[in-house]
């Protein structure tokens, strides 16, 4: 119930319908009443919230890559927004009521630069990842000067290792060395190519799950 302080034409304090009256620092003010949530979120809504949280935290360390190389910005949606949407809709499944990532569906980049031809990754002692591929620099929009990047994720450590522009497409071989704390761990490995001007990239290629020696 509201209280009239100065008669019918004066200010008031309390609630009247959808508004609240009060006196603050000698001034009569009126504001709308806050909306009250009438129900708790459904299980489906809670699961969607969990998926969103998982996708955002998973992709945060590679945000810099995806802001340059994930699709094309569309209206209010940035490339990072597109990457999050893709990850939620295409790479997360429910396992016993908990969202989990399907790593072979994860995309680091999404673009139309010609990708690798017959790329194969192997591990070598000392945390070395050895990647080989065949020359396809004359196919499509590929160029010999396209840059090769390798990206690894360790679920056990919740950690990304990023090696950008380590060699060119024409080199046909790339080697990177993971930090010592990755030894004995399992990593998911991806690679992508971007043009020399760093304005476009290929869709990332999943190279499999590997044990680091």
Image (cartoon, grey):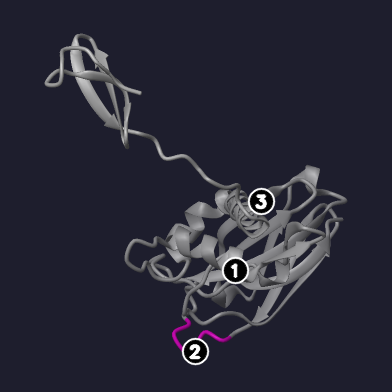
Q: Earlier in the sequence, mark 1 or mark 3?
A: 1
Rendered position, 77 above or below 40: below
Instruction: Give the residues in magenta.
Output: 136-142
Q: Quadrant of residue 208?
A: bottom right
Q: Magenta-highlighted stretch: main secondary structure? A: loop
Which secondary structure lies at badge 1? helix
What residue sits right under mark 1 in the picture?
A: 89
Alpha-carbon distance for marks 2 and 1? 35 Å
Place of residue 141 in the rendered image (x, y in percent of width and height, measured from the top left):
44, 85
Q: Nearer the viewer, residue 165 or 40?
A: 40
What residue sits right under mark 2 in the picture?
A: 138
Alpha-carbon distance for marks 1 and 3? 22 Å
Q: Earlier in the sequence, mark 2 or mark 1?
A: 1
Place of residue 170 in the rendered image (x, y in percent of width and height, measured from the top left):
56, 77
Q: Nearer the viewer, residue 43 or 142?
A: 43
Quadrant assignment for the N terminus: top left
What residue sits right under mark 3 in the picture?
A: 160
Which secondary structure lies at badge 2? loop
Q: Is residue 138 magenta?
A: yes
């Amino acid at each position: 119930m509201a209280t009239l302080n100065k008669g019918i034409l004066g200010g008031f304090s309390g609630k009247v319908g959808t508004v609240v009256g009060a006196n603050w620092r000698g001034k009569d003010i009126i504001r709308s009443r806050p909306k009250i949530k009438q129900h708790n979120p459904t299980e489906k809504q809670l699961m969607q919230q969990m998926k969103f949280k998982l996708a955002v935290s998973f992709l945060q360390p590679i945000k810099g890559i995806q802001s340059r190389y994930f699709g094309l910005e569309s209206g209010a949606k940035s490339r990072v927004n597109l990457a999050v949407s893709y990850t939620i809709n295409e790479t997360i499944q429910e396992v016993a009521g908990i969202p989990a990532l399907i790593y072979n569906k994860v995309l680091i980049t999404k673009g139309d630069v010609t990708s690798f031809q017959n790329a194969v990754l192997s591990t070598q002692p000392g945390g070395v990842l050895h990647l080989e591929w065949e020359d396809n620099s004359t196919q499509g929009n590929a160029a010999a000067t396209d840059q090769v990047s390798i990206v690894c994720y360790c679920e056990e450590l919740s950690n990304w290792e990023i090696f950008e522009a380590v060699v060119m497409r024409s080199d046909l071989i790339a080697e990177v060395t993971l930090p010592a704390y990755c030894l004995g761990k399992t990593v998911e490995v991806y690679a992508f190519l971007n043009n020399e001007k760093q304005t476009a990239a290929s869709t990332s290629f999943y190279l499999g799950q590997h044990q680091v020696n």
